[in-house]
Amino acid sequence: MASTVYFSRTITPEKVLALFETLGVTLPGRVAVKVHSGEKGNQNFLHPEFWRPVIEKVGGTVVECNTAYKGERDTTEKHRRLLSYHGWDRYFPVDLLDGEGPDLKLAIPEGKTIKENYVGKNLADYDSMLVLSHFKGHPMGGYGGAIKQLSIGVASSYGKAYIHGAGEPEKLWSADHDAFLSSMADAAKSVIDYFEGRIVYVNVMKNMSVDCDCCAVAEDPCIADIGILVSTDPVAIDKACVDLVYACSDPGRPHLIERIESRNGTYTIDCAEVLSCGSKEYTLVEIE
């Protein structure tokens, strides 16, 4: 059964809110709003002002987790300082989910590569989730979107290493690549199951570099902005974004496609569908 993905070529904070409202979903209870805080020095991440209307609409708390690699987000102290520097706490309550241990362990009985996922323990304080993703390329995953936000994004610092290492955190950068991609799908499945479907996804195709917002030194965007997508299906929304990249005629398109294909990025989407995280079959409903 095809999932519905709403799409607009207009990229404004107000349009994000309008598409969310078009979805007609109410997120219950305490809402965790997963964002990417942006590594210090990165020029492409989406700032809090862009997300402000939709976050205020759901009355959510911005949530993040520490990284597993060196930078300005690898410790609680540094990450909190950067969240403030980028202005997240100027507008919203902010919760660093793994700011203090121990981690919350989620079981993944259906997992292809990993059978457990380690997330920030404060995830237990929330009833639903709004996943706000900046769609772009990624040095390891090929692309970054909703599935990556659910997996690497919600994972604790240790959990990130566990996913990257396909269950062996000491192999953070040396695990089999496809096993890492499969582990991301497994981890995403655990978060989807945890919230029992009480999640909405927003992907914004703007400032699309081949590099992630986690890169302090990232390439500038290589392709023109495409639009905003909203869905309750993380597989469908990521697949729709990839399809829109392939369908566009921008001269920078081959560069982004090379990044996705050279990292086998869509394998994560394939694995997530097999795990029943969502469907690659979708109906794209365009709204002006």
Image: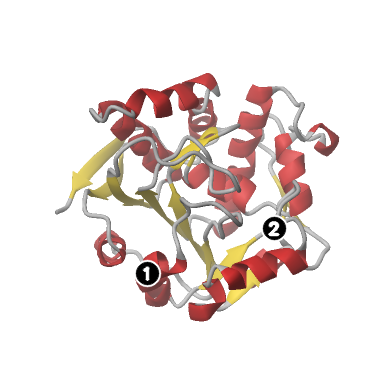
Tell me where residue 69 appears, x and y as whole percent. 75, 46
Mark 1 vs mark 2: give the one in front.
2
Q: Which mark is residue 73?
A: 2
In this picture, is 110 found above or below 31?
above
Amino acid type at circle 2 is Arg
Q: Dot 1: within a 10 Å radius of its alpha carbon, few (fewer than 14), some, or many (20 or more) residues?
A: many
Residue at image coords 35%, 48%: 206
Residue 117 visible in rendering? no
Amino acid type at circle 1 is Val
- The one of 104 and 215 positioned closer to us in this rendering: 215
Residue 262 visible in rendering? yes
User: In the rendered image, which residue does mark 1 sit on?
Assistant: 54
Q: Is residue 245 left or right of residue 259?
A: left
Residue at image coords 41%, 46%: 233
Tell me where residue 96 appears, x and y as whole percent. 67, 67
- The one of 102 and 36 positioned closer to us in this rendering: 36
Residue at image coords 76%, 68%: 77
Q: Is residue 21 left or right of residue 47?
A: left
Quarter of image, res 136: top left
Residue at image coords 58%, 37%: 185
Q: Is residue 278 left or right of residue 217?
A: left
Q: Is residue 16 left or right of residue 234?
A: left
- The one of 163 and 134 positioned closer to us in this rendering: 134
Distance, label 1 to label 2, CA atoms, is 25 Å
Tell me where residue 125 appears, x and y as whole percent. 65, 72
Where is the C terminus found, in terms of image quarters? bottom left
Q: Secondary structure at mark 2?
A: loop
Q: Dot 2: within a 10 Å radius of its alpha carbon, few (fewer than 14), some, or many (20 or more) residues?
A: many
- The one of 245 and 45 positioned closer to us in this rendering: 45
Where is the N terminus found, in terms of image quarters? top left
